Amino acid sequence: MDALARKLGLRTDPTIFFTSAGIMILFLVVILIAPGPIGDAFGAGREWIVTNLGWFFIFGVTSWVAFLLWVAISRYGAIRLGGNDAKPAYSNISWFAMLFAGGIGTVLMFWGVAEPISHFTTPPRPGVEPFSVEAADDAMSFSIYHLGLHTWAIFAMPGLAFAYFIYRFNLPMRFSSVFYPLIGERIYGSVGKSLDIFAILGTLFGVAVSIGLGTQQISAGLTELFGIPDAVMPKVLIIAILTSVAVGSIVAGLDSGVKRLSNINIGMAVGLMMFVLFTGSTVFLLRAVVETFGLYISNLLPMAFWNDTLATYTNDDGSGWGWQGSWTVFYWAWTVTWSPFIGIFVARISRGRTIREFVLGVLFAPSIFTLIWFAIFGWSAMEIDGIGPEAREAMGEQAGVLSAAVGESIPLAMFAFFENFPAATLIQGLAVVIVAIFFATSSDSASLVVDMLCTGSPDPGPWHQRVFWGVSEGMLAAMLIVLAGDAGLTALQEVITVVGLPMFILVFAMMFALFRGLSHEDLGAVKVGDPPKPEELSASEKGRT
């Protein structure tokens, strides 16, 4: 494999590169041949995980939030990622823009209207009347819970672990480096390479699903705007065009391509949000933004530990998991498959920041933006749909227009929402552009991260090596849509949910690896140096006991 890598002009670890590419191709062939059976098998696995280990996901993510906050406010918070003299490479605004665009920008566009309306229509908690004021409060609280602090803790945990061990211990920029305190020099052997390959495959499959969902929303928007059929070939063309944009950004690199796209996109997203605020019920929405902060703060602790324990007694079918099994647990399992990608990406753009800056910035900046986004889009959507029986009765046939649209097609929800605003066609077109750029930003940043995981270096590999991963992501999504249709995409969703369990366990282990590394810091003279040997860590721990 070394000879083949040299012949192709690659600068990478041949074992990691070719094994990852080979498994990706093999899995694609299998899922294309039999998407139904694959989906059924992994669907059964997902059902078992949700039913028996859902509590582990709920507890795990909440424990990560608590651990990260403790690290930030502790004496370890002053440790600088990259040495005492390191300076941040990006301004706070550019840093936040890349965090947001590379993280969940596409998700907010997809679910900004659809998730609050879904929970408003089908309340999470038993005994809550659909479309009621209480249902509206719960819908907003759970939507922000799913995409606020807890989601960003899933990204921040591996991100901090990567940044700490890579920049302070001078270890390769690979997934396996995080586990140095636990497995020692084996990160350079077959165990470490297996971990790296697993992280690459999780990233590729997770990005493929995101591309598939983003394509569905763009296609739905083009159908609404221009009557273009919501069919296979237009979706493939969308993927081809946006993959080309992503490839151009990949070639330009992180500083030029990804940074520029991210800054443009965050500006457009903020502009869209301001449009909804000032052309909608402005005073109502401003009051709602303030009140939503209170809702989230007051409900955060109960939601963070809620396990739907009494679902057996409240569900009509007597099932052990109710609403939460198909929402919160699914979210955490799916999101964690992205964590190596977002973690490495966030670590790469965060060199020079202190641990305190990193944790508070990654957790709170995107979460506050998410809260404001959901408060404006979610409350506006529920107001349009009708909150409470009196309001819905007064609205007549207009009541329930958005809940019906979400029930018919979630990708169409945002576009149905904009029909209630001035210049609807123009704004719907702008929304398509924003989703498209979020799509390209996620794809190019994921490609750069996969390349880093293969090379073990923050410096970009040869351009054709980076382009290979960008094209692979687009082709993976396109071939699934062409040859397997919705069944292929659904099967891949089931697969990455099951893959989420071992990835979740690995990220959980990162918490212990990070604590072990931090506990041996000499805070009086912190500096970049060689990583301690595993036996030194063990001996030091024995001395403390």
Image (cartoon, rainbow, N blue to C red):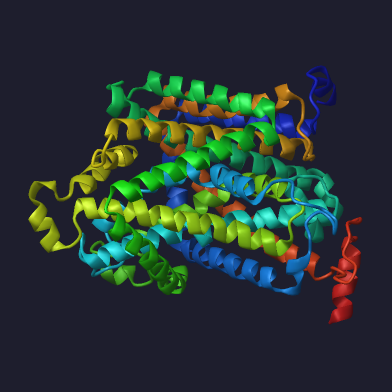
In the picture, measured across the screen, residue 29 lies left or right of residue 111, that is right
**Residue 84's quadrant in the figure?**
bottom right
Residue at horizontal 39 percent and vertical 18 percent from the top: 233
In the picture, measured across the screen, residue 94 lies left or right of residue 10, that is left
Q: Nearer the viewer, residue 412 or 369?
A: 369
Q: Looking at the image, is 504 positioned above or below residue 424?
A: below
- Quadrant, the C terminus: bottom right
Residue at horizontal 79 percent and vertical 43 percent from the top: 190
Residue 377 visible from this viewpoint? yes
- Quadrant, the N terminus: top right
Q: How many marks?
A: 0
Residue 87: x and y, percent? 79, 52
Residue 48 visible from this viewpoint? no
Residue at horizontal 50 percent and vertical 48 percent from the top: 497
Residue 264: x and y, percent? 54, 36
**Residue 490's quadrant in the figure?**
top left
Residue 240: x and y, percent? 50, 21
Residue 76: x and y, percent? 76, 69
Residue at horizontal 45 percent and vertical 53 percent from the top: 330
In the picture, measured across the screen, residue 146 lies left or right of residue 62, that is left
Q: Looking at the image, is 542 positioned above or below residue 532?
A: below
Q: Looking at the image, is 413 positioned above or below residue 291?
A: above
